[in-house]
Structures are given as C-alpha cells and as structure tokens.
Amino acid sequence: MQGNPRLGILLPEDGPPDYEWYELNERHGFGDTLPAIEVGKVFSDGHHEHLALMSLGATERLAAVGEGLVKGGGVQAVVWACTSGSFIGGLEWAFAQSRELSQWLGVPATSTALAFRDALAALACRRVDLLSPYPPEVTEQLMTFLSDSHVGVDGLQVLDYPYAADSHRLDIAAAVRDFAKRYPSDNPILVPDTAINTLERVGAMNREAGRMVLTANQVSLWAGLRLLGRSGPPRYLQALAEVA
C-alpha cells in the first residue's frame, strides 16, 4: 500500500470517555509496531436491544462516519468495532453489512462479529465458552451467529447488562477468572463487547484462565491488521499473532 498505513475504527459513541481505542496511538511503543489508528464515532445510546442494534448497524449510518475516516483521515481499511451491532441481524446480514460498507467507502472493511468468526477459523476452534455481557435475547442472537459460523457454545454465562456503559464498568479480569473456574475446559473463552477495555489485560486474562481468551477489541485489531497486510504485537494479539 502507498503511504503510511492507517486503520479506521468505527466505534459506537455511547458515553464512556475512556474507551481504549481513543488513546491507543499514544501508548508507549505502539507507533513502532502498528499503523496509526483513526477513530470515527457513531452516535449510539448503547442499548443492548434488537431494534436499537439493527438501527446502529445500518450501512448508511456507518458509512456517513466512515467517509470522514477515508477522505479526511486517509485510512486504508475500516473495522466496524461493535460486536452486537454486527451480529444482531445474523451471519448473512453481517456479511452484507461489511460488503456494502466496503463498496461505499472504497476500502476493505470488516466487523468485530466477522473478526470473531475469522479468528476462530484461523485458530481451528469449533467449541467455545461464552462470557456474554448482553441480555439473554441478544446473547441468543450471538449464539445463533456462532452456530451458523460452525462454532458451538458449551459453557455460558449471561451477565444481562442492558447498556454498553454497564459492560464498560465490569471488572473483566475478575469475571474471566471466576468464569474459568465455574466452567473448566480447554475451550477458548469469548469476551464480546468492544465497550470492555481488554487489550492491556488479555495476557493476564489468559494466565488467570489457564487457557485462551479472545476479546472483542483483540479480534477487531487483528482483523484490521489483516486487511492492511500487517502483523501486530503478541502483547495485544496473543495467540492471534501467530496466525494470518
């Protein structure tokens, strides 16, 4: 690709000011190993509810913000970094969302839901344990998405948080530790919801759980780097740093 690589992240703007994507460029050593990150904020009330999430994930709503990232920020690939806003309509809906966004913006695009799907395929994982922050109805949609992606769920905990801000306040390291004890297995643990800051914690969570933990922001970063033809630091990507 021409010029310095730049990755666009479309992120719901739903309240919390300290999402890790906002300051990722300023982290020590980040610029030496990863492309610049440009964040486009998509207004949202953060509600984990079917109709609200379908509206949030509408292509025209995402493209309106994404155009600024491409034309103003010079990004060469875009990730819609919202798990629920990319699985809520099902697998084919997620494919269409990504495809239409790419056509609209003129650059490669993907989403967090598809990133989970691709990461599990790359790691040859077909069974997972799911720590879901979502209410039961939205969790069911995620499980259907995974099933349609040929991934089965064994251990399941539904935290029933109605809003993204609720997920954001979760002590994720403690939640993963307790979940791993409650559901002992060799399955990877999935932690969806990009509202949960995990990039600096994922290594510790792997150690606490004694197995692989895959988080929404982790797989989103990995998928975006793949679109740019770039690798990333194991500090953030863990096992995903070893797969293309």
Image (tube, grey):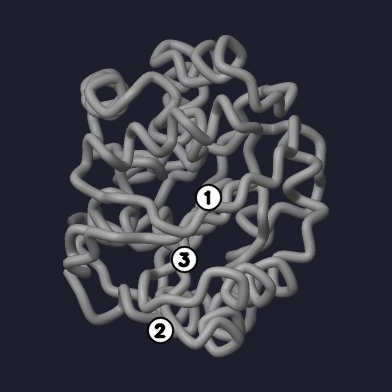
Spatial CA distance of label 3 from label 2 is 18 Å
Residue picked out by circle 3: 189
The residue that disc 2 covers is 234
Q: Position of residue 43 (x, y in %)?
A: 67, 23
Under tag 1, what secondary structure?
A: loop
The residue singled out by tag 1 in the image is: 192
Quadrant hosting residue 40: top right
Front-most of 69 and 11? Answer: 11
| Residue 84 against residue 227 in the figure, above or below | above
Percent x, y of residue 57? 47, 20
Tell me the quarter of the image containing the N terminus: bottom left
In the image, residue 8 sits, relative to residue 4, either above or below, namely: above
Taking the spot 46% from the left edge, 66% from the top edge, the residue there is: 189
Q: Amino acid at mark 2?
A: Pro
Residue 244 is situated, as x and y percent measured from the top left of the image, at 17, 69
Q: Residue at x 18, y 64 (%)?
A: 122
Disc 3 versus disc 1: distance between alpha carbons?
Answer: 10 Å
Disc 3 or 2, which lies upstream in sequence? 3
Report the mark closest to the observer, 3 or 1.
Answer: 3
Tell me the mark number nearer the camera, choosing from 3 and 2.
3
